[in-house]
Image (spheres, rainbow, N blue to C red):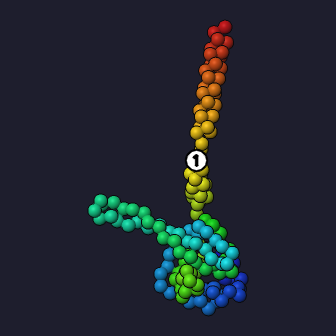
Amino acid sequence: MNDKTETEKCEDKRCPIHGNLVTRGRKFEGIVIGKDLHGTAKVEWSRKKKIQKYERYEIKRSRVKAHIPKCMEIGKGDKVLIEECRPLSKTKNFVITQKIGTDILYKAKEEALIEGKFKESKKEIENKEKRMEKEDTRDENNDFIEEEMSEE
């Protein structure tokens, strides 16, 4: 556990460290992909499932909502350990018990998703192609001029 959580007392009743919330059942390690103002985080983790017919594996992912205790500073992209507890709300049955670290590739994945959502129009593609052709002809002209200068 973090030194900060052990020394710092929180007034959160739903904290598994300082409060009276009992954890039981399943434990998972995942990445925080979303966070809201009410102390809830959306945690995701991947798992492999074998498809017997094709003798291959498919990657599936699970997402659950978990409570963030007030004594922990959790943000998007953090790797956390969550444990099952009693139902805290309609959709929350887990609580974050430990922050393990940060995921290195989280920001890169998020940027790639954002870039993939925006498609370039035909005009923008044509303009890029024209610019590329102009740059190629400039490079050829510069090479030709350099060859003439070296011959003299």
Q: Nearer the viewer, residue 53 or 145?
A: 53
- Classify mark 1: residues with Cα within 10 Å, few (<14), some (14-19) or many (20+): few
Q: Secondary structure at mark 1?
A: loop
In which quadrant of the rendered image does the N terminus lie? bottom right
Q: Nearer the viewer, residue 56 or 27?
A: 56
Determine the residue located farthest toward the top in the rendered image. 152
Q: Position of residue 108 (x, y in %)?
A: 59, 55
Q: Position of residue 20 (x, y in %)?
A: 62, 91
Residue 102 in view, yes or no: no
Please tell me in which quadrant of the rendered image residue 122 appears. top right
Q: Please tell me which residue is depicted at 58% across the width and 78% down the height of the picture.
A: 66
Residue under pointer 1:
119
Q: Amino acid at mark 1?
A: Lys
Tally the numbered discs. Answer: 1
Q: Please tell me which residue is depicted at 64% across the width and 11% down the height of the picture.
A: 148
In which quadrant of the rendered image does the C terminus lie? top right
Q: Please tell me which residue is depicted at 64% across the width and 19% down the height of the picture.
A: 141
Q: Position of residue 44 (x, y in %)?
A: 53, 69
Determine the residue located farthest toward the left in the rendered image. 53
